[in-house]
Image (cartoon, rainbow, N blue to C red):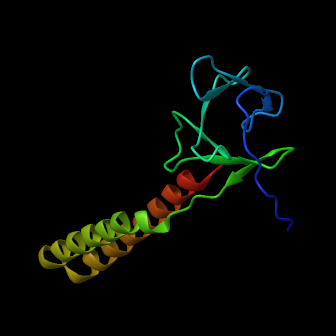
Amino acid sequence: MRFHQSCSVNLSKNYPCPCRRRGRLIPIVLTEALGCDRCQQIFIVHEDQRAIEQLATVYPSRRLWRWTGSRWQLKKNHIPGQQWPGIVALLLTVFIGWSFLALYSPLILSIILGIAIAAALVFFLIYSFWLSYRR
């Protein structure tokens, strides 16, 4: 894998849009932002003038791109530590629900329900990770 050193972003130049191949980033007057002429996305330039960030994104984490001189390179910004509280809360909820079912239900029914709830939790976690990290 080649290492691309990032170049500074000049607000007076036009750049290709990182979201679409045919769009062009054009400077927005009186701001330190760039707008795409095709997809209508707005990008702000960071303080170090080497990266842009997409505003109003539907992704859970910020999307940053660095200019390599010829193309935009998406900076991976995965923070797995932010997802642990949600995972622990879901596991705790399933455990508490299963323990209530075990107290008030026959043993076989509570085991079957516990397995079904655990399978639903696994599918929910896989689906949430897919939503978080899809492109």
- Relative placement, left or right, of 2 versus 39 is right
Q: Nearer the viewer, residue 34 or 49?
A: 49
Question: In the visual, does 81 lie left or right of 34?
Answer: left
Q: Which of the 4 image quadrants contains residue 120?
A: bottom left
Kindly identify the residue that appears in the image at 57 percent across and 44 percent down.
47
Query: What residue lies at 16% left-to-right and 72% top-to-bottom?
Result: 100
- Residue 39: image location, x then y, percent: 69, 25
- Quarter of the picture holding the N terminus: bottom right
Number of numbered discs overlaid on the protein picture:
0
Q: Residue furthest bottom?
A: 107
Q: Looking at the image, which residue is at 84% across and 45% down? A: 69
Residue 125 placed where, x, y %? 46, 63
Above or below, 37 against 54 in this view is above
Q: Indicate whether 34 appears above or below 122.
A: above
Occupied quadrant, residue 11:
top right
Identify the residue shown where x is 58% and y is 18%.
30
Residue 106 seen in the current view: yes
Residue 43 point in image, percent of width and height: 61, 33
Between 32 and 120, the one nearer to me in the picture: 32
In the image: residue 94, left or right of residue 25: left
- Whether residue 105 is visible, yes or no, is no
Left or right relative to 61: residue 36 = right
Task: Name the foreground residue: 119 vs 39.
Answer: 39
The outermost residue toward the top is 29
